[in-house]
Image: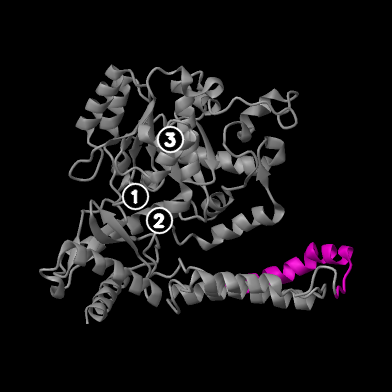
Amino acid sequence: MESANEGSTASARDRIRMAYDPALLRTAGERLAQELGRHMAFVQASGGSVLNWFSPQENIARATHLADNVVDSVDPTELVSRFERIVHEMLARGHNLHDPRYVGHQVPAPIPLAGLFDAVGSVTNQVMAVYEMGPWSTAVELAMVSKLAGYLGWRDGEYAGLVTHGGSLANLNALLVARNVTLQTCWEQGLRGTTKPPVLVVQSDTHYSIARTAGILGVGTRQVIKVGLDDRRRMNVVELEQTLAHLQASGHPIIAVVACACSTPIGAFDPLNSIADICEKHGVWLHVDAAHGGSALLSPTHRHLVAGLERADSLVWDAHKMLFVPALCAFLYFKQRKHSYDAFQQHAPYLFDPTAPGLAEYDLGLRTVECTKRAAAYGLWGAWSLFGAQLFTDLVDVTFDLGRELYEKLVYAPDFEPLHHPECNIVVFRHLPPELDGATPAEQGQFQRRLRRRVIESGEFYLVATNLDGTEALRVTLINPLTTAEHLDQLLETLRRMGREILS
């Protein structure tokens, strides 16, 4: 490999000029569009592997090789040719979420055109912090904040919303506000003013980002109090009532109750109206992690699952899950507008302009953990503006209905065991062929793990493994709207065939 100065055939100005050359951008963009179109046709037809499996060492070595072996050239033909080779390598080694056989994590096959709208923001670097830094990206974000809030029944001017880089960051931001509202001197004085340790009260299956938040906020993971679950793996409201009463009688400040809509393990939706009643009775902040299930609001068929979501003091709703746009695009809402300013107390005279105080309302950097952030709502806004709201309703309905279809197939298959009745598009089950009759739970569990590993490395399907109360199982999220009932039949047959291979 040549160093930057050895054998150089171009000057610094030549290289910079070509890196910014509009003609090169146009030609490379045309080739990229052609390659992406070809790739999508191939992947959506299941022409290759769902997961292009290579070991970490192989992938790192290949990525390093491409980064090291660069020819110092400003020739446009050579640069376009190299650009095509790099793109081809990215697609050949990436995860093919648009293959209908992808039934893995809560990561969707996003609307492809949404990615092109995101690309406009990336190429032109539309960033945000204060309004004047990104006037159009701010307008787009706030337009979509208002659109989605409409499904909550909230009125403009009463609530506040913004977009963050992911649900974990949104949960952190929301609970930071809840902490500052509950412990009003905490921002400057820390937790030392409390006589008893403050706590977070959470649903037992709450996402791990909540425990991380407790550690980051100085509350401590040991002060995360888990409320048990009912027979549908939802928060037990009787136990919640008892827990809050006990904590308040003991003098522990309660920062928030965290409910799920829905939880990650099986997609269970907590009874939000009952939880909101209890939180109001005890004067406790209610935060709902609706990262996955918030999109049920768009479906007349499924919106009953999130009844009461509008009563939350704060909530998280990820567009990069069930609104099918590229990551990351997470919406954070506060029911009371004033609370969105309770996250921070900051002074940055170089950023916030005192000569235009009316613009502060649009300076979203005042309210988020991020200062500079990308124009994360471009993909959602572009797709919404292109197709309209009905497409997003369709996406929720089709994928949620796939969860029910898979469950019914599992019920009628003697060699499969569903572990719950799905409420959405997350389904957990086990494959138990006759050869495992009489096997120990440990042996059955090991079989599920081995089976999953064999399937994903084959490239025929991609699904994940999980553990429910000590039971090893398989877990799918039907988050590709191109998946059909026929693909579900194919999944079960693939599991049967590879199960036989393992047992033989």
Region in magenta: 7-36
* Residue located 33% across and 37% down the image: 259
* Residue located 35% across and 36% down the image: 309
Label 1 packing within 10 angstroms: few (<14), some (14-19), many (20+): some
- Kindly tell me whether residue 31 is visible in this rendering: no
How many angstroms separate mark 1 from mark 2 (CA)? 9 Å
Q: Are marks 1 and 2 in contact (CB under 8 Å)?
A: yes
Q: Residue at label 3?
A: 214
Q: The residue under label 2 is which amino acid type?
A: Gln
* Quadrant of the snapshot with the C terminus: bottom left
x, y percentage for residue 203? 30, 38
Assess whether residue 27 is covered by the magenta stretch.
Answer: yes
Q: Residue at label 2?
A: 106
Tell which of 298 and 431 is nearer to you: 431
Residue depth check, mark 3 versus mark 1: number of the one nearer the observer: 3
Q: Residue at label 1?
A: 264
The answer to whether residue 421 is left or right of residue 390 is: left
Label 2 packing within 10 angstroms: few (<14), some (14-19), many (20+): some
* Quadrant of the snapshot with the N terminus: bottom right
What's the magenta bit mostly, secondary-structure-wise?
helix
Q: Residue furthest left?
A: 438
x, y percentage for residue 123? 69, 57
